[in-house]
Amino acid sequence: MSNNKVLEGMKIPEHVAIIMDGNGRWAKKRMLPRNMGHVQGAKTVEQICEDADSVGIKYLTVYAFSTENWSRPEKEVNAIMKLLRNYLKDCIKRANTNNMKVRVIGERSRLSDDIREKIEELEEASKNNTGLNFTIALNYGSKDEITRAVKRIVRDCVDGITNVEDIDEKMISGYLDTAGIPDPDLLIRTSGEERLSNYLMWQLAYAEFYFTDVLWPDFDKDELIKAIEKYNGRDRRFGGVNEE
Ligand code: FPP
């Protein structure tokens, strides 16, 4: 299949968020070390960016490393960081070839200096690109993001930059790491798990959820199309009712 024709006449979600789960199980099934699952998962990320762009998705956000993932064995954390380091380096070239604008969300102070520098370089190099808006959640957790936003809002109130009375949902959204990015329309989680795992909890308030048993390294354009088809079967009412 892999053909955009099947999507003709369908509503394409503007923003798709993905929890890329199942790398470890993918490797285990093949008697490979867990890290090989992450390596293959990173390749899937590259391909899915191109696929998302080709079907007309404007924003894609992936969960690469959560604030909780530091509790994994040190060897695995180091391997993921090494992979991310290489990915970020290559991504500068790829972002410009594919006209992709890349942003990283999450708390950066715990990341190593060289990773932080690569993130800054990548964001700067791709900031004027007009194609897919690709966001990588790295050392990201919703509770951490909201806590940091609350601190900044309180500080701005104390400093007289804003007032308590002016705090509303729009203002809070503007203090989150995702400021300026529309809320996701569709959340995809692979590998059969059906949890939010501290991902974009504020932003996903009205998103449709799509869960699939496919392991992340096996997720491809056909699977993306299946998720979009399912999304089209949903009746999004945002808390209201649809008029007959
Ligand atoms: C979940 O699989 C995956 C992760 C915690 C890491 C995701 C990282 C990548 C896909 C690679 C790097 C990312 C980018 C953006 C290049 P798991 O290890 O929890 O799998 P399991 O549940 O089967 O053990």
Image: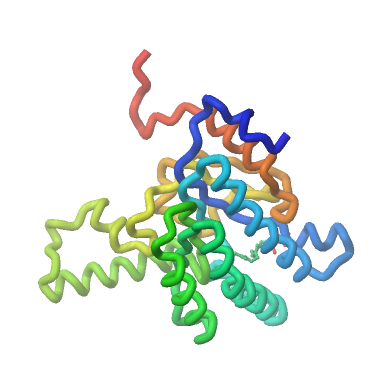
Q: Which residue is drawn at 47% across and 52% down?
A: 131
Q: Nearer the viewer, residue 35 or 6?
A: 6
Task: Classify 27 as above or below 151.
Answer: above
Q: Which residue is drawn at 43% across and 64% down?
A: 143
Total count of labels: 0
Estimate the x, y position of residue 113 in percent, counting from the top left.
50, 86
Q: In this view, does 202 lie to the left or right of 87?
A: left
* Residue sitting at the far bottom: 113
Estimate the x, y position of residue 177 in percent, counting from the top left.
38, 64
The answer to whether residue 219 of the structure is visible from this angle is: yes
* Residue sitting at the far front: 97
Q: Which of 86 and 190 is in front in this view?
A: 86
Q: Residue at x 68, y 81 (%)?
A: 74
Q: Coloured how?
A: rainbow
Image quadrant where residue 86 sits: bottom right
Estimate the x, y position of residue 219 in percent, counting from the top left.
70, 49
Picture quadrant of ligand 1: bottom right
Q: Which residue is drawn at 54% across and 33% down?
A: 231
Q: Is residue 159 left or right of residue 97?
A: left
Query: On the rendered image, what quadrant is the N terminus found in?
Result: top right
Image quadrant where residue 200 sits: bottom left
Task: Classify 230 as above or below 138.
Answer: above
Estimate the x, y position of residue 171 in percent, counting from the top left.
24, 57
* Residue sitting at the far top: 244
The answer to whether residue 72 of the structure is visible from this angle is: no
Query: On the rendered image, what quadrant is the C terminus found in?
Result: top left
